[in-house]
Image (spheres, rainbow, N blue to C red):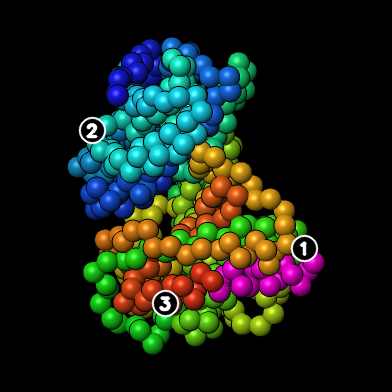
Amino acid sequence: MESELVFAGVRAGTGPATWGQSAIWDVVRRLGDDAARYNVSGGLPLDPPLPMDRVADIIRVLLRRHDSLRTRLADGEDCLRQVMHAEGAVPVHARECAPADVIDTAYAFYHELQGMAFDAERELPVRVGVVVAEGRVGYLILSLSHTATDGWGLRNLLAECATLCAGGALPEEELLQPLEEAALQQSDKGRRQDANARRSWVDKLTRGPESQFPERAGRPAADVFPNAVLNSPALALALDRVAIGLAVSPSAVLLAAAAAAAARLGGAPDAVFQVVVNNRFRPGMAGAVNTIAQEGLLHLPGTAGDFAGLVRRTFGAALSAQRHAYYDKLALDRDIAQLRAACDHSCFVNDTRGLMPIPGYATPADEPLHRARARTTLTWPVEHAPRRNTTFALDAQDAPGSLELAMTADAAVLPRDDMERFLYGIEDLVVGEAIKLS
């Protein structure tokens, strides 16, 4: 069942697209229906359930507050442009069920909405999903195009939604909107930031290994890219324990384990990953709902040896990558094309834990690691079309009582048995270090 939620009475405008909008647009426009995997979606239970008109009012507050939710993209003659609307409508999809079935219905509904691609030129970049029981909304789902926001922006949006649903008020703060962000990027300060970031990238690209999997270099890409998902309650427990024990972030532990596991497969002494970075370090960005996150380039020399030492070095290298992860990606692509030789930068890591809440999520119960590890599973849910300039993409994501590593890889470079060794290798390293520290 579908209806529309109409809004009006807010500002309109047009201008150049932001770096983040342009980068995502450049990716999703080539993917067709497969672009849906770039959606960012999340939801929250409403306790107590709310009437639909109250939920509609809350969504209108969010539409007025965040210009990105009312912005389409247009491919102009000179550059990509953003078009912000003062009035319009967003679709509301509804599912009805019994009160006892709200969570199960929401789980299936979440995946249904997540799988629906957006047309960034013709549609506003948000869909609303509601699970209705006995005439009231028991679960709310927001599915957004990645051109509108990233995972951190979605987290901000859901937090605001939860506050409003509970009857609270949102803080009065200056939020950087997409048109103002684009103006900042076009300023002298923004151009200096862009130039410094691209210079750092080019420097790292001249120092990394030519191939991280040299024994298979030069092969044509496979016709399909398999997707493997390792579900590991033990990894969820061990990751936090190692991070606390070594006084680093959990993401640094995960990156170090991925680097060491990749080196075991490919034999390259260094690891080079494109790592998705938050980028919300500047005024007005912390609470913004924009697509600000971009890839930082992580170059990690020498991945062999003591794992604890590798984790500490990874933490420092990740900070360097974060400092230079805000830039004009299309300009960077032109810089890379002009290099006589660039190192292998075809491996991607994205830690989305805590960003896109899923129905039924709960942190794993504390238990001995050997017992938790007995429940690890590996599945092969889908196959994707080939991805340009990609050896593998690794996503760390929340799962009910667990952590999942979802890996999509070029089977011509990393066959399924190597993907399996890679994922279990990450678990081995992190769980093994947690046992050492216990």
- Viewer-closest of 6 and 325: 6
Taking the magenta stretch, the answer to whether it contains residue 259 is no
Q: Are marks 2 and 3 in contact (CB under 8 Å)?
A: no
- Viewer-closest of 365 and 414: 365
Amino acid found under the numbered disc labelled 2: Arg
Q: Position of residue 218 (x, y in %)?
A: 30, 82
Residue at image coords 30%, 60%: 384
Q: Position of residue 295 (x, y in %)?
A: 47, 57
Q: Is residue 285 visible?
A: no
Among the 4 quarters of the image, the one containing residue 202: bottom left
Earlier along the polypeptide chain: callout 1 or callout 3? Answer: 1
Q: Using the numbered discs, state the Cα–Cα distance from disc 1 to disc 2 in whole angstroms.
A: 50 Å
What residue would you read off at disc 3?
A: 417
Amino acid found under the numbered disc labelled 1: Gly
Q: Secondary structure at mark 2?
A: loop
Q: Residues within 10 Å of mark 3 (few under 14, many from 20)?
A: few
- Viewer-closest of 408 and 237: 237
Residue at image coords 68%, 50%: 365
The disc placed on residue 245 is 1
Q: Quadrant of the N terminus?
A: top left
Q: Is residue 6 left or right of residue 376?
A: left
Residue at image coords 74%, 70%: 435
What residue would you read off at disc 2?
A: 122
Among the 4 quarters of the image, the one containing residue 355: top right
Q: Secondary structure at mark 3?
A: helix
Q: Residues within 10 Å of mark 2 (few under 14, many from 20)?
A: few
Residue at image coords 63%, 73%: 429
Majority secondary structure in the magenta region? helix
Amino acid found under the numbered disc labelled 3: Asp
Taking the magenta stretch, the answer to whether it contains residue 437 is yes
Q: The magenta stretch spans which residues?
A: 425-438
